[in-house]
Image: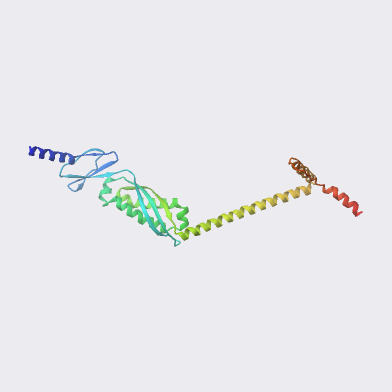
Amino acid sequence: MQAIIIIVVVLLILLFNIFKVLNEYERAVIFRLGRLVNPRGPGLVILIPGLERMRRIDMRTITMDVPPQDVITRDNVSVKVNAVVYFRVIDVSKAVVEVENYLYATSQLSQTTLRSVCGEAELDDLLIGREQINMRLQEILDTATDPWGIKVSMVEIKHIDLPPEMQRAMARQAEAERERRAKVINAEGEFQAAEKLSDAARIIAEAPQALQLRYLQTLREIATENNSTTIFPIPIDFLNAFMRKVSE
């Protein structure tokens, strides 16, 4: 009876080691007596006991968070920058044979590349030109990881941590910029108003009747309001007639 139990256990162990089931997004890298053979999967994979061993590789896109890195920009500003890297394995054989641990290797390469690229840029470029820096990071990482069978599809800078004194300086700069724009807008408004007044004065000088029409319009506006006192402006020509008689 014990012998039967032992045989059943051995058979179960053999079956467990012989038959493997892989999901749609998984591939099996097979080594036969230490030599690489063609990858297998997905679905049922049958191994030769004692001769073949398998390593399971996930081919889905991996989201890797790059921890904050201390960076000194080209204009000598110390900042902390972190990012996120999106990549996937496209050649499972290279991912196993060409590098010991492709996840760790990609993480370390991402950190060093982030420090290098951000250190070549100025602070304004980091804050404003993130898209160009992201593309530069993606290009470098994709080229470096290609021999490992990895495709880096996207790199995004998540956060840039500025020192407190730099944050205060940027706040003062932004406030000064807003004040400058307000003054410029106010000056432009005054200039446009002066132009309109100059045009109105020129029209009135060329056509004195326009002033009389303006008087009538003013009276109309006053009459629409609930005022107890109404002021009637006297035409200037009427006063000029009296002034000529006095001078005579």
Q: Quadrant of residue 69?
A: bottom left
* 238 and 134: which is toward the camera: 238
Task: Residue 119 in the image: state x and y as whole percent.
Answer: 41, 59
The image quadrant where one finds the C terminus is bottom right
In front here: 227 or 111? 227
Residue 178's x, y, as percent?
A: 56, 54
Applied colour scheme: rainbow
Q: With 164 as the anchor, is 194 left or right in this view?
A: right
In the rendered image, the residue lying farthest to the right is 248
Residue 155: image location, x then y, percent: 39, 49
Between 172 and 128, which is closer to the camera in this rendering?
A: 172
Residue 104 drawn at (x, y percent): 30, 52
- Which residue is situated farthest in the bottom direction here? 76
**In percent of the image, x 47 and y 59: which residue is there?**
166
Q: Is residue 21 above or below residue 78?
A: above
Tell me the quadrant of the picture where the N terminus can be found: top left
Query: What residue is rendered at 66% in x and 53% in y?
Result: 190
Identity of the residue furthest to the front in this view: 228
Residue in the picture at 8% in, 39% down: 2
- The image shows a total of numbered marks equal to 0
